Image: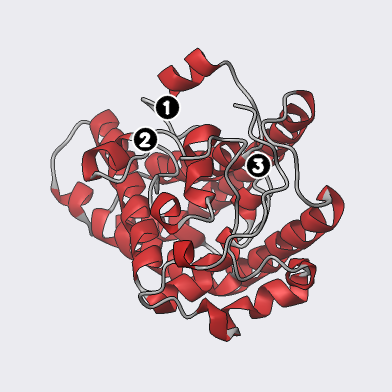
């Protein structure tokens, strides 16, 4: 039964991934939010190539992933939700909420600690933000993130359904809220009270340090509001702000080999240096909010 759960998880996650990716890619064609500053083809080739590398690394190091850990702790009745007597549905809901908050905290930590920022800035170095940016993470960051996630799952002992739902939501909403898509303004304002929307998360990719140290959430938007890291709109507007990082804007940093060695570059040492103190390049996108 455990093997069956793992097989089903893989099928469900792959189906959801492909479905959401295609939907977002089509939406970006039909209702694009921002004009791209560089050619999409080479960016997508590099970003999706990174996805392949990440997938291989995860399968080699963590073949059972988070749901495998949930199965393991369930066998020995270990973890918070194995010790508490709660209705199944409540355990599922609480597990998803706690896992989502853990991802929020992890994201904040990756920005705050220079050694972790060296890994995470690969995600922020994308000069445009679209559906593929939501999948663009350095393999070393994926490894650290997976270790943290496995530790949280081990401590919680969540139901398998909760882990599966969370993993599918995390992947799907990451692609959604990074997508370069436009939606009706009124609908977007209402939707972002529940989940992180593209316009909300795009601010997090601003070249301005004061803006990209906000809106850390991936799924639920409530964590940023509760923790005081929410920013409603960028100073220059959605189409006026510059995206990415000031020190990786050259075209040579858009190839897969260069992306993989980014954390080794001296300029990724963040310490107390603010990106807003760096000279900002001319913005090729005209404000049109």
Asked whether the beta carbons under mark 2 and mark 1 sit within 8 Å of each other, the answer is yes
- Across and down, in percent, residue 271 comes to 38, 78
Q: Residue at x 61, y 62 (%)?
A: 125
Q: Between residues 41 and 72, which one lies in front from this camera angle? A: 41
Q: Earlier in the sequence, mark 3 or mark 1?
A: 3
| Residue at mark 3 to residue at mark 2: CA–CA distance | 21 Å
Which labelled disc corresponds to residue 17?
Answer: 3
Query: Quadrant location of the C terminus?
Result: top right
Residue 62: x and y in percent read 53, 69
Residue highlighted by disc 1? 192
**Any part of residue 87 in sight:** yes
Mark earlier in primary sequence (3, 2):
3
How far apart are labels 2 and 1 at the CA level? Answer: 6 Å
Estimate the x, y position of residue 69 in percent, counting from the top left.
Answer: 40, 61
Disc 3 and disc 1: Cα gap in Å?
A: 22 Å
Residue at 44%, 76% in the rendered image = 270
Determine the secondary structure under disc 3. helix
Identity of the residue drawn at 34% across and 64% down: 109
């Amino acid at each position: 039964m455990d093997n069956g759960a793992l097989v089903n998880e893989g099928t469900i996650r792959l189906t959801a991934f492909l479905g959401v990716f295609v939907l977002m890619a089509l939406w970006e064609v039909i209702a694009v939010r921002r004009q791209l500053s560089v050619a999409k083809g080479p960016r997508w080739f590099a970003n999706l190539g990174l996805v392949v590398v990440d997938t291989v690394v995860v399968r080699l190091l963590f073949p059972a992933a988070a749901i495998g850990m949930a199965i393991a702790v369930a066998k020995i009745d270990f973890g918070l939700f194995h010790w508490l007597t709660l209705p199944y549905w409540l355990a599922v809901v609480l597990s998803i909420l706690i896992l989502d908050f853990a991802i929020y905290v992890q994201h904040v930590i990756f920005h705050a600690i220079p050694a972790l920022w060296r890994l995470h800035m690969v995600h922020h170095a994308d000069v445009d933000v679209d559906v593929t940016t939501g999948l663009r993470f350095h393999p070393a960051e994926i490894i650290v993130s997976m270790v943290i996630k496995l530790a949280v799952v081990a401590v919680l002992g969540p139901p398998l359904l909760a882990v599966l739902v969370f993993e599918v939501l995390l992947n799907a909403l990451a692609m959604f809220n990074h997508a370069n898509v436009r939606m009706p303004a009124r609908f977007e304002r209402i939707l972002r009270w529940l989940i992180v929307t593209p316009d909300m998360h795009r601010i997090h990719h601003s070249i301005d340090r004061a803006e990209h140290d906000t809106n850390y959430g991936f799924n639920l938007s409530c964590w940023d509001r509760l923790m005081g890291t929410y920013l409603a709109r960028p100073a220059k507007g959605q189409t006026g702000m510059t995206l990415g990082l000031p020190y990786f804007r050259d075209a040579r940093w858009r190839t897969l080999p260069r992306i993989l060695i980014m954390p080794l570059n001296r300029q990724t040492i963040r310490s107390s240096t603010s990106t807003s103190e760096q000279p900002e390049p001319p913005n090729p996108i005209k404000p049109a909010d």
